[in-house]
Amino acid sequence: MTATEPQERRQYFMTAMREGLQEALREDPRVVILGEDVDRGVIGATSRLIREFGPDRIRNTPISEAALVGSCVGAAAVGARPVVDLMYSSFLYVAMDQLANQAAKLRYMSGGQVSLPIVYFANTGPSGGAAAQHSEAPHPMLMNLAGVKVVMPSSPHDAKGLILSAIRDPNPVVYLQDGMLAGVKDAVPDGAYSIPLGTAEVKREGADITVVAVGVLVREALKVAEELAPQGISVEVVDPRTLAPLDMDTIYDSVAKTRRLVVADNARITCSLASEITAAVSENMFDTLLTAPRRVAMRNVPMPFAPELESTVTVNARNIREAVLNTINSGGKR
Amino acid sequence: MTTSNLLQPYRLMVRIRRFEEKLDRLFKEGALPGFVHLYIGEEAVAVGVCSELRTDDRITSTHRGHGHLIAKGAEVDRMMAELLGKATGYCHGKGGSMHIVDFDLGIIGTNGIVGAGMPIATGAAWGDKFLGRDSVSVAFFGDGAANQGLLLESLNLAAVWNLPVIFVCENNQYAEWTRVDQLTAGSIHERGHALGVPGVSVDGNDVLAMREAVATAVERARHGEGPTIIEAQTYRWSGHNLGEEAFAGNYRPKDEQEHWRAQDPIVRYREHLVSTVGIDPAVLDAIDAEETQRVEDATEFAHNSPSPQPHEAFEGLFAEYQELSA
């Protein structure tokens, strides 16, 4: 590095996300952050924002998830732009009617009369010892709602760009922070930048097999791709970034090239994101595929507490590597 | 109070009654799809409340919402069209009986989920306050909804944030098919007591008593004094929903029904207008005839309206980015 090149800024996931929130709060006075202890920020995304924006825009709320999720529907309907920290996506279940029946449906069932610019953000999936009621990965059921967008960044860089897009979007968005990314640092540009919702990104190009992964599993998939390259296996890694609406075109394009597919997802395998993508690819690209697509997803149990048990039921690089090799080595079509 | 201020509530109550009676007939003819919950007997609550609200005040309504909508200014032709699933309806046929809204009239939600409107009204009150407006929000809910946890959550939020929201409970004595005293402990208007939210029980079949109670609550709300609970004691003349007879049987005693029918809010108000105010009954008869005709015209409008096109099922889910310019 020469002296004239700018110093690369490396930020933690939560720091990058906080910068995105800060940009959104600065650019639109209607944006308000609400949640339990957001003045201090339990997970870290909202820490210290109160110093710049004050308690009217960084609002602590009672532990009343249903009222919190629902009141933001009313607030958005009259012109505010609430951004809600739900802490853990497991807590969404407490407020499920207000999300699924109210936020997701009010626009559609009113014949498009209203826009509801709301962001609900939450830590999601395993985060190491959080156990069954703080480790849910509910993104598949959220994808199934229609009427809410679902976003899951895989890096600090994307965390910042996607939170800004989510807040600018005139619709309810659930923004899920993969709990395993909290300790990850990455290059994050200064200032405001946005990543469009509904667009996937090819994180690494490859020729032999497509691995679609979300959240921290994108990093795991990239590790696998790196490991397998010397063996002459070229892995393409696709990150949907937005899960609803899901950019299937980028996935189809990738599979058209590689003709093999593995999908890695830390939601339970039944009706997972992995299930949806493999089903859609099987249905639409059966003749292109050389062999059956594979799902690598969490096992069908609640999250156990002990580290040995958690790692047994969740997805890691080893599982992805195994699935990639099995797919490459399977006989398939001739 | 001016004469038009006195006659308009009468007109609106009659309009609600005629509209609901028409729905009853349409349902029996098999011409009305879906779930329909009639408001007959409770007209003084909706009209009493909405008579004290401005257009930029908000309401969230319930599954039994037609009366609230009419009282807040909704047009019966577009309502009827929505009930018949027509493209000219308020929601272009996507909402139906339980989901008619008109955001321009401050009707920001009509709910098929019991109790679900309470946090939405609370949030609207907060949103308006945050944005520097002096609008007031009203959450209509039934005695059944009083047993949802959201009442406590919403009351607490409204109290702790001192929000301009009024919780109007329509205690029509039955939660679906079961009498309120078998399901609901204590009195609903006192449920805010420990939270410092004042509550009042009102004769919900007396439109003037309703107006008075609501005027006080609106005054409080608009001047930053926070939420109020109003429990309107009233009675649902019809069943919980049209067509329930096959399953519900006869669950309400005949003498009870007769007692409440003798308290007809429209008849009571009419008597007040004639005897106390001195309105010529012919004026009220003319209003009756006009409203009957209005509902007939609305029905004809709805019948003559086109159905939505199949492709419309896939439209309007998400707003486009540019739609939200300030």
Image: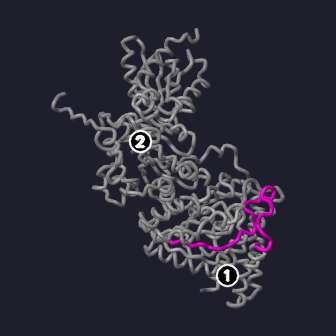
* Residue A127 screen position, x and y as percent: 39, 36
- Work out which quarter of the rendered image holds the C terminus of chain B and state it: bottom left
- Horizontal side of residue B179 vs B49, given as left or right: right
Which corner quadrant of the image does residue B43 belong to? bottom right
Report the front residue among B193 and B109.
Answer: B193
Q: Are marks 2 and 1 on the same chain?
A: no
* Residue A314 screen position, x and y as percent: 45, 29
Asked if residue A96 is positioned above or below residue B54 in the image, the reply reads above
Q: Give the residue pinned by disc 1.
A: B7
Farthest-out residue, top: A334
Report the front residue among A108 and B242.
Answer: B242
Residue B247: in magenta span: yes
- Contact, mark 2 vs mark 1 (Cβ under 8 Å): no
Can residue B56 be seen here? Answer: no
- Work out which quarter of the rendered image holds the N terminus of chain B and state it: bottom right
- The chain containing the residue under callout 1 comes to B
| Circle 2 residues within 10 Å: few <14, some 14–19, many ≥20 | many
**Label 2 SS:** strand
Q: Give the residue pinned by disc 2.
A: A123
Which residue occupies 64% across, 69% down? B171
Residue B243: in magenta span: yes
Three-letter amino acid code at the position of disc 2: Asn
Three-letter amino acid code at the position of disc 1: Leu
Which stretch did the figure color magenta? Answer: B228-256
Which residue occupies 49% across, 47% down? A92
